[in-house]
Amino acid sequence: MIDPQLLRENPDAVRRSQELRGASVALVDDAVAADAERRARIGEFESLRAEQNAFGKTVAAAPKEEKAALVAQAQELAAKVKAAQQAVTDAEDAFSRIVGALGNVPIDGVPAGGEDDWVLVREHGSPASFDFEPRDHAEIGELLDAIDIARGVKVSGSRFYFLKGLGARLELALMNLGLDTALQHGFTPLITPTLVRPEIMSGTGFLGEHADEVYHLDKGDDLYLTGTSEVALAGYHSDEILDLSDGPLRYAGWSTCYRREAGSAGKDNRGILRVHQFNKLEMFSYVGPSDAEAEHERLLSFQEAMLQACGLSYRVIDVAAGDLGSSAARKFDVEAWVPTQGTYRELTSTSNCTTYQARRLDIRYRTESGKTAPVATLNGTLATTRWLVAILETHQQADGSVVVPDALRPYLGGLEVLAR
RNA sequence: GGAGACGUCGCAUAGUCCGGUCGAGUGCACCACCCUGCUAAGGUGGAGACCCCUUUAUUGGGGUCCGAGGGUUCAAAUCCCUCCGUCUCCGCCA
């Protein structure tokens, strides 16, 4: 949730934010009103409560012949207190519902608009060219006996697959390259739970507009399957006051990810570009708010280093405000060239959530003056199963074999070419 | 899955049976000062989180927090209910 103080002191900034996102500006007025209402009700309750507390003491201290009369008086007061308390509860519920619906305020420079209004930050490398007709990754995967889609569908349904032999090894190699990269930069590896409680799921913002994307267990276990380890990584320090005096806390979380892909029927049906289950290595940083933008650049640079190590050409885009998740204040996607699609496809994404997510999960740190303040949280992908698509297609040869990028060879026992 | 015990402001505990004197005591750790002077001890004082008003200076006042949420009551850490979690024993299964 956004900083209520910003809402109070500079509602215009929030209005601009909503406008940039293409979201409701009127909601800001509702939020301001809800805030005022909430504070008024709190004031009423507290003064009544103070009166009751004081009165309770005289009742307790009174001699027993006077007690009956005093208690009768107190009853009246108690009824008022109870009503006032209910009014506070209602006002606070309304406030958090309305304010919670406001997205994070984009950082200056984030382009306005929606999905297609991203701004190119930079390009690296040039799209691969071939002197033969390139095969798509599904075909290569079949030729190499590396990706078995037919049996994935047989066992689990559409959008499922088996990674087999070289495919399985390639994914593990990629993950290990990512893990080593993370370790070099001081990230602590974490293998995270993929089933989480409702409060963690909603605290991280995944039960909002994208609730349909999430698998939920309904056999008496009120748990959600996470679509990214970001959920567990953010929940990890929820309700805590962190010690950031030695610098940011950085984690590299590895987990399987589950997505329902509701609403994308017919989209990317072929291969493993869009699947219900995949693996991902995710970076997650808890930093002081003033360090957030620098940290964002760092995460992006690690991602680019990974893409480069895998020999992929890519572009970095600054995602437009309307296409940010509600938690993000800025998001960079790194998209790799996928030869058979003749276009760039998202391989990684890194979001600076500033203090938005932390405020909802109640994650704070101690400032120099000893006070507590919400931390900033950032996340970014370091490797996912989807990378296999770009790697296989980019480095394929006419005979269907695939050249292994140098950086991955040590993780494949020195293998230089994937061939059957 | 069955039976039992438990969840107190950093950690450890007192208090809960007999509701008001506990808006919470004590020990350790922590911070400041004093004493002393040496790889320590002693003394004094302080100290949490959140919210509202005020001030805008880390000011002053008020409210909330005894796992979470409800209930009973003039009044609940203390009684009742639900949920979450921990521990012990048994069963079952890896």
Image: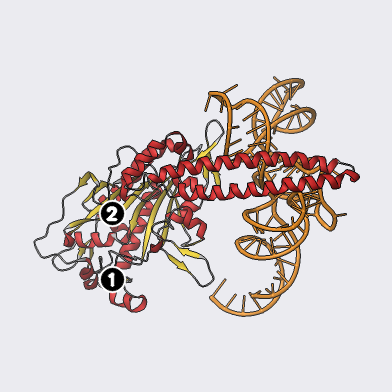
Residue type of the residue flagged with mark 1: Ile
Instruction: Name the chain under label 2.
Output: A
Q: Quadrant of the C terminus of chain A?
A: bottom left
Q: Is residue A32 above or below residue A416?
A: above
Q: Earlier in the sequence, mark 2 or mark 1?
A: 1
Q: Does residue A84 appear to the left or right of A303 in the view shown?
A: right
Q: Secondary structure at mark 1?
A: strand
Q: Is residue B61 above or below residue A205?
A: above
Q: Is residue A111 above or below residue A192?
A: above
Q: Is residue A78 above or below residue A399?
A: above
User: Hey, which quadrant is residue A165 in on the image?
Assistant: bottom left
Q: Which residue is mark 2?
A: A407
Measure the alpha-carbon separation of dots 2 and 1.
Answer: 22 Å
Look at 37% across and 64% down and name the residue there.
A259
Q: Does residue A234 appear to the left or right of A19 in the view shown?
A: right
Residue type of the residue flagged with mark 2: Ala
Q: Secondary structure at mark 2?
A: helix
Give the number of the disc on residue A255.
Answer: none
Q: Which residue is mark 1?
A: A147
Foreground mark, 2 or 1, reads: 1
Look at 30% across and 63% down and name the residue there.
A170
User: Hey, which quadrant is residue B1 in on the image?
Assistant: bottom right
